[in-house]
Amino acid sequence: MDIRTALKKHWTVIAIIGLIFVLFFEAQYFIHSVEHFYSQGELRPMYRHRETEIVPQASPSAKATIATVKNVTVTPTLNASSIQLWMTFDYINVVCKLPTNYLKDILGANDPRYPNVRLDTYATRSGIDPQVLLRTVQQYVASYQNTH
Amino acid sequence: MDAFAQTILPYILLYKYWALFIVTFLSSLAIPIPAGTLLVASSAFASQGYFNIIIVLVVVIVANIIGDNICFWISRLYGRRIFERFSFTRKVLDSKNFRLIEAKIKQRPGFVIFISRFEAIATLSVNIVCGLSGVSYQRYMVFEAIGAVGDALLYGMVGYIFGDSWEAVNNLIGNFSIIVFVVLIGCVILFWKRIMKNLSTEHLLENTK
């Protein structure tokens, strides 16, 4: 029996073996990806952070008092370095636990849509370089998170 | 995160539940929008405190159900007329294989309807076939609703549990599901003849007449 005939006769088996190899290598890649993301700290179930949330509208001193009493640390759910240009001020305020007008006051933002405006849109309207605005916002947010 | 999702995500932040509803609704009509990614992201935003997870899930489920029902009823009311206008689709409709699949789905639609909710093209295909084949609307609606809830819970819980790690998890799921999908398609192609042979019974052909 020549190779061509053998291939024709057993193509199903060959195809199944090929599919198994594909699945095997994909599983390897998947496991490697999981290990990579986990080692980078990018796979962290949020329930560990959620139990530390307290009332976001409370003043800094009230939060500190409650935290002391409950022996709990207030932890924002988004680091300043994770802020991106497509995010809105409203979103940044909520997840970084900022006062509503903190960024508005510090940037001197007089956009009527604040805080429901994206960073890149605000930068375009204000004539600011988007990357400069992004770095500025990240710095101010980091500064607030370090002091509160 | 792919560029398309990154284009739509800001509108989810700006217009919140309304944007999520519209995006999910359009996706259920098989418009190629990455609704799964956006649901994972919205659930992550909920875990961060920006959205309410219950409202996110309800909005997504309702949008999916409405979109699927529209497909179903368009197929039920106008499907045959539309398909018979074009020679290619008329051939598909008249083919023995399509009649067998139609008969099988009409006989036991539950599992097929449920499992198809987890993949957009399968959802559209099954909605159209269910509409064409005369599957009882009550049966369709029950399994469709269960599937929509399951789909929303699956993606929603991934985003909610992993929060701001959602992009990494979404990438992992995306990579893995593409390959699983390709392998499944490969298996269907390999065993197509056997599947058709199993479906091809005199009893099923009698039911289609």
Image (cartoon, coloured by chain):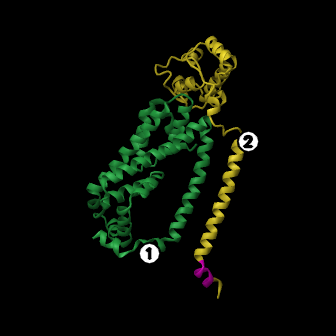
Name which residue type carries label 1: Lys
**Please, which residue is most extreme toward the top here?**
A61
Q: Main secondary structure of the magenta part?
A: helix
Residue at 72% across, 40% down = A40
**Please, which residue is most extreme toward the bottom here?**
A1
The disc placed on residue A39 is 2
Residue at 61% across, 66% down = A19
Chain B's shade in the image? green
| Residue A95 counted in the magenta span | no
Name which residue type carries label 2: Ser
User: Mark 1 or mark 2, which is nearer to you?
Assistant: 1
Chain A's shade in the image? yellow
Question: Residue B138 in the image: x percent, y percent?
Answer: 31, 51
Looking at the figure, which quarter contains the C terminus of chain A? top right
Q: Residues within 10 Å of mark 2 (few under 14, many from 20)?
A: few
Q: Is residue B43 left or right of residue A70?
A: left
- In the image, residue A7 sits, relative to residue B68, either above or below, namely below
